Amino acid sequence: MDGNNQTVVSEFILQGLVNSKNIQVLLLVILLILYLLIMSGNTVILILVSTDRHLLSPMYFLLANLSFIDIWLSSNTTPKMIIDFLRKNKTISFTGCMFQVFFTHCIASGEMVLLVVMAYDRYVAICKPLQYITIMNLNRCIVLVLTSWTIGFIHGISHLVEVVQLPFCGPKEIDSFFCDTPLLIKLACIDSHDLNTSMNAECGVVAVTCFILLIISYTNILITVCQNSKAGASKAMSTCSAHITVVMIFFLPCIFIYVWPLRIPWLDKFFAVFYSVCTPLLNPAIYTLRNKEMKNAMKRFKGKYLGLKVNS
C-alpha cells in the first residue's frame, strides 16, 4: 500500500465476546452444545428430505436448502469463536478475515431471499391451491433457489470488494469475535462516513425489501385462511406466528447491525451471536421438527436404516 502511514496487514486480532475467563469457559460449553445441535438437526433434515420419497414436495425441497444454508451460516463464525475461547492470542489472517466477510454477507443475504421464497411457496399453497403444482414446479423451485444464491453471491462480493482495498494504518484489533465490514471500515485510515452510508444502503435494499415481502406474504395467508375457515385460522395463526418469530430473530439483528446500526459494541456482538447461532438452531424446530410429515419420515428412517421399531 502507498503512503508512509499505511501498512500491509497480514493478520487481525479479535477481542472476542468477553474478557472474563470464567464466562469464556461457560460460553465455550454452551456454544459448543448449541453448534452440535445445529449441525445434527440440520443434517438430519437434509438426510430425511434426500432419502424419503414422501418429502418430494416443493416445501421440503426449500426446507432442505434452508438447512444447508443454516449449516454454512453457523459454521462461518461459530467454530472459530469456540476455538478462540481456548486461545490467549485470538488472531485471524487477512485472507481468513476476507473469507469471513464474504461468507457472512453471501450466506445471510441468500437466506433472506430463501425465506421470502418459502413464504411465497406457502402463499401459493394456501391462497392458490389449485395452481400450486403448476406454479411451484421443480424447475421453478430450482430457479428460485439459484436466484437466492446468486443474490447472496453478488451481495457478498460487493462487500468483499469494499473491504479488501481498505488502507489500514492504525491498530489491528477488532472488537468482536469475527471479521465484518463495519468493523473493518472502522479500522481503516480513511474518512469512513461515505463508505458506511453506502454499506447501510446496500444492506438496506436486501434486508428491508425481503422483510417487507415476508410480512406481505404472511399477512395475505392469514387473511385468506380467516376468510375461508375459522377452524383453519387458529392453525394458520400458530404456524405463521412461529415462522414470523424466526423471521424477526434473523432479520432484526441484521437490520440493527447493518441498516440502522446502534454502534454499541456489546449489543452488536449479542446480535451477531443471535442470528448466527439462534436462527440456525430454531429453523429445524420451527419449520420441520414440529411438522407431522417430518416426524413420520423420521420414524420411517429409523425403521428402514436403523432397524428400530417405532410405534405409530
Image (cartoon, rainbow, N blue to C red):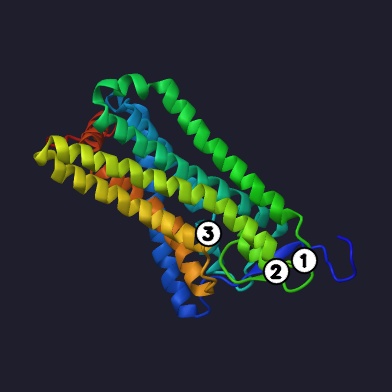
Residue found at x 64% / y 51%: 159
- What residue do we see at 61% from left, 41% from top? 154
Q: Answer above or below: position of 24 versus 159.
A: below
Q: Is residue 199 above or below residue 20?
A: above
Whether residue 51 is visible, yes or no, is yes
Q: Nearer the viewer, residue 57 or 195?
A: 195
Spatial CA distance of label 1 from label 2 is 6 Å
Q: Residue furthest top?
A: 134
Secondary structure under badge 1? loop
Q: Nearer the viewer, mark 1 or mark 3?
A: 3
Left or right? Give the position of 4 relative to 300.
right
Q: Position of residue 113 (x, y in %)?
A: 46, 41
The image quarter containing residue 178 is bottom right
Q: Are marks 1 and 2 in contact (CB under 8 Å)?
A: yes
Q: Are marks 2 and 3 in contact (CB under 8 Å)?
A: no
Q: What type is the residue that disc 1 sits on?
A: Phe
Amino acid, disc 2: Leu
Q: Which residue is the site of mark 3?
A: 259
Distance from the alpha carbon under mark 2 to that under mark 3: 19 Å
Among the two numbered marks 2 and 3 on one chain, the one whose residue lies closer to the N terminus: 2
Name which of mark 1 and mark 3 comes first in the sequence: 1
Q: Are marks 1 and 3 in contact (CB under 8 Å)?
A: no
- The residue wearing badge 1 is 168
Q: Split into 4 quadrants, where in the image is the C terminus? A: top left
Quadrant showing the N terminus: bottom right
Q: What amino acid is at disc 3?
A: Val
Pointer 1 or 2: first along the chain: 1
